[in-house]
Image (cartoon, rainbow, N blue to C red):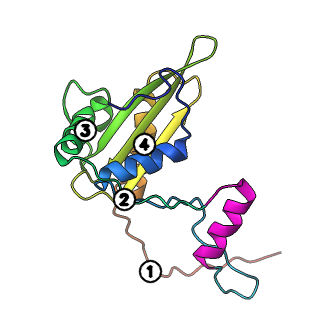
Amino acid sequence: MLLFGQGDNEFSPLQMARYISMLANGGKKIDVTTVKTIRNADGSEVSREDINGFVNKKLGLEEDNTDNREINQSHLNAVLEGMKSVTSDSGGTAYVRFKDFNISVGGKTGSAEAPNNKVHAWFVGFAPFENPEIAIVVMVENGGHGNYTAEVVRDIMTEYFGMNTQNIEENMQAIPYIEIMQ
């Protein structure tokens, strides 16, 4: 069971994205980045190693030498099926957000305790469930229940998978136009 912020846990959204990605991919180490590419003034691309080195140096991070995780397959399957039920079973905490979604999603809502009786809303999800290619984490400070953030994840997935496109027909017929200036 994934719990966010219950007790003395402190996880960043990026840490949770990496965690969910590793679960969705059977324990395979996932390198997370927030920079897709950097181009020099001459148009050449900066290497991934140079980007990672620069970011790690600026953030004071050490190189991650962890290996893939060995996860008991039956335990992993139970966790993943539970995450699928969150979005696909009528009793799931994010079912209402994903019930008519065309792609199967694994996810987990979270309501993390915060100071002054506040509650941060979390949702972590990945899709497609059968062959994951995207993992998303949304956290809203003082947002209440994670069900609300599941809607944001659904909207991001809709964009990512191109499900919001409409059949647009463009009229390419030229119409003469004349305007007389006086």
Camera-nearest label, 4 or 1: 4
CA gap, disc 3 and disc 2: 18 Å
Pick whichever of labels 3 and 2 is earlier in the sequence: 2
CA gap, disc 4 and disc 1: 40 Å
Q: How many marks?
A: 4
CA gap, disc 1 and disc 3: 56 Å
- SS majority, magenta: helix
Residue 81 in percent (x, y) is at 20, 40
Residue projecting furthest to the right? 182
Q: Which mark is residue 153?
A: 4
Q: Is residue 130 left or right of residue 122?
A: left
Camera-nearest label, 3 or 2: 2
Q: Residue at x 53, y 47 (%)?
A: 14
Camera-nearest label, 1 or 3: 3
Magenta residue span: 47-62
Residue 53 drawn above or below residue 144: below
